[in-house]
Image (cartoon, rainbow, N blue to C red):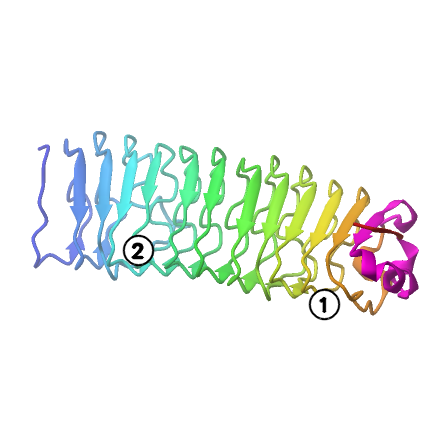
Amino acid sequence: MTSVTIGSSITALPSNVFSRTGITSIIIPEQIANIDLEAFEGTNRLETVYFNAVNCADFMPAFAHPPFHNTRSPALKTVVIGDKVIKIPNSIFSGVTTLTSLTIGSSVTEIGDRSFNGCTGLTSIVIPNSVQTIGPFAFNGCANVTSITLGSELNTIRQSAFVGTRITELTLPENLTRLWEGSFENSTRLRTVNFNAVNCEVGVGSPFKGSQALTNIIFGPNVRQIPAYVAFQLIGLESITFGSRVNQIGDRAFYGCIALEEIVNNAARPQVMINAMFFEGVDKSLCTVRVPAASVNAYKAANFWKDFQIVAQ
């Protein structure tokens, strides 16, 4: 059997229903609510899945491999998430190491936990503007990804969502309000982060921990608050740029950034520092702070900033 059409009255795909068939593609229709873990066992020619199920149940990979894992469907290359899908179920495409093409529909608001965990064949990830939440470990272990595009309405990225990718640059959107510790952990080639989130909170630990090639963080022109722990112990960080609206720096934001040598601070008024923990471990006498020419004297007189080397931009 090389082709199958699932009727509109069918709501579940039971164990072994398509086991060891010769199908090369399948459309999972809107009404499917349950897919058994072994529904596609041994579908060795299945290359394309069109996933349109609106309310499909999550999967529990702790007990067994999910339905499209490479041990069940070893040829799966393309996944298209339909435009009516709201949530991509937890773990549904986890372990599909052959997956090279992923399209996420325009109505998806949540990408579930571990939904694409370990998809090592992916090289790029595009998150549409509709997505608001990316769950824990959603793209964990996608080790060959070199490009991540995040949608404008994204507000939450949970822990370990993008661990171990090969991206070199990352842009975080303005609407992002919650970035969990380790979200982009061990991004060993990441060098530049364009941080545009206006008011974002970070967990106790940097979202970029283990990304020791990260040398440059640029906080966008609308950013008002530098999150606590955002660059905690990033020992390779050399340069920071603050937008003109930055008026607050979170606790231990740049703690342990021992390689820091330049801060471009575009704020006309020096930020008020409560204590020295923001830049603990930074040799301030060797770090140059470039500020607007009219603000040089104000920075030199400010309790905290005066310890740096203040120069005009």
- Kindly identify which residue carries mark 1: 247
Q: Residue at x 49, y 63 (%)?
A: 155
Q: Could you give the CA–CA distance between mark 2 and mark 1, rounded to whole angstroms?
A: 36 Å
The answer to whether residue 77 shows anywhere in this view is yes
- The residue nearer to you, when weighing 243 against 286, is 243
Secondary element at image label 2: loop
Q: Amino acid at mark 2?
A: Ser
| Vertical arrangement, residue 122 with respect to residue 220, above or below | above
In percent of width and height, residue 41 lies at 24, 38
Say left or right for 291 vs 158.
Answer: right
The answer to whether residue 41 shows anywhere in this view is no
- The residue nearer to you, when weighing 136 against 254, is 254
Residue 117, by quadrant, is top left
Give the quadrant of the N terminus: top left
In percent of width and height, residue 9 lies at 7, 59
Q: Which numbered mark, 2 or 1, is in the foreground of this view?
A: 1
In the image, the segment drawn in magenta is: 282-308
In percent of width and height, residue 195 lies at 60, 53
Say left or right for 204 vs 20.
Answer: right
In percent of width and height, residue 29 lies at 16, 53
Q: Residue at x 75, y 42 (%)?
A: 238
- The residue nearer to you, when weighing 56 against 252, is 252
Q: Is residue 66 magenta?
A: no
- Kindly identify which residue carries mark 2: 106
Q: Residue furthest front?
A: 294
User: Which of pointers 2 and 1 lies earlier in the amino acid sequence?
Assistant: 2
| Vertical arrangement, residue 151 with respect to residue 201, above or below | above
Q: Residues within 10 Å of mark 2 (few under 14, many from 20)?
A: some
Secondary element at image label 1: loop
